[in-house]
Image (cartoon, grey):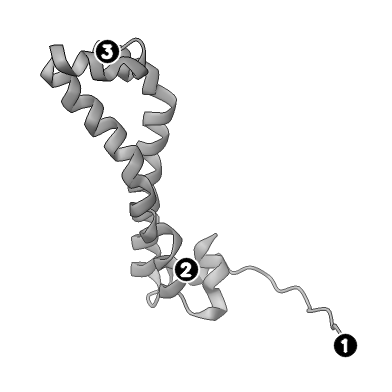
Amino acid sequence: MGDLTEEEPQDTNYGLLFCKEYIRRTLFVSLSWSAIVMPYFALTFFGPKILGQIGLDNALLFLAAAYTVVPVAVAVVAYFGYLFSYGIMSITTGIYPSEVFPSSIRALGLG
């Protein structure tokens, strides 16, 4: 096996992310994260309260409620639809950011 040489640590320059060349990329990645993560945590943390407000004390009984109250069914489908589609939407935060920054600052841009 070849010699493993230890790399010299380098200082992190966060200013690079906000320079003229990368500011649009940084803003896009930041907005993508915010648009996906904030609603996700809001639904996760406040999910029981949200479901309670629309008349569902037990989320497993949403099918029974759907037959009696149509708006509840729509709200429940929208609620769980968002949670399901989270995986699809996360492409803009999981894959795309690693492609928009050059190798030299990729880890900095993703972090």
Looking at the image, which residue is at 31% across and 15% down?
Answer: 61
Q: Position of residue 18 (x, y in %)?
A: 43, 67
Question: What quarter of the picture does the N terminus occupy?
Answer: bottom right
Residue 70 lies left or right of residue 25; in this view the side is left
Q: Secondary structure at mark 2?
A: helix
**Residue 39 in the image: above or below residue 32:** above
- SS class of the residue under badge 1? loop
Task: Please identify the quarter of the rendering in which residue 101 is found.
Answer: bottom left
What's under tag 2, amino acid-wise?
Leu
Residue highlighted by disc 3: 53
Of callouts 2 and 3, which one flags the residue occurring earlier in the amino acid sequence? Answer: 2
At x 78%, y 79%, the residue is 7
Q: Earlier in the sequence, mark 1 or mark 3?
A: 1
Residue 3's disc number: 1
Residue 62 in the image: state x and y as whole percent.
Answer: 27, 18
Look at discs 2 and 3 and give the one toward the viewer: 3
Left or right: where 55 falls relative to 86: left
In this view, the mark in front (1 or 2): 1
Q: Who comes first in sequence, dot 1 or dot 2? A: 1
Tell me the crowding category of disc 2: few under 14, some 14 to 19, or many 20 or more residues within 10 angstroms, Cα based: some
Residue 5 location, x and y as percent?
Answer: 84, 83
Say the numbered circle drawn on residue 17. Answer: 2
Alpha carbon separation for disc pair 2 and 3: 42 Å
SS class, disc 3 = helix
Given the image, on which type of amino acid does mark 1 rest?
Asp
The amino acid type, in three-letter code, at marker 3 is Gln
Q: In the rendered view, would you say 11 is above or below 37?
A: below
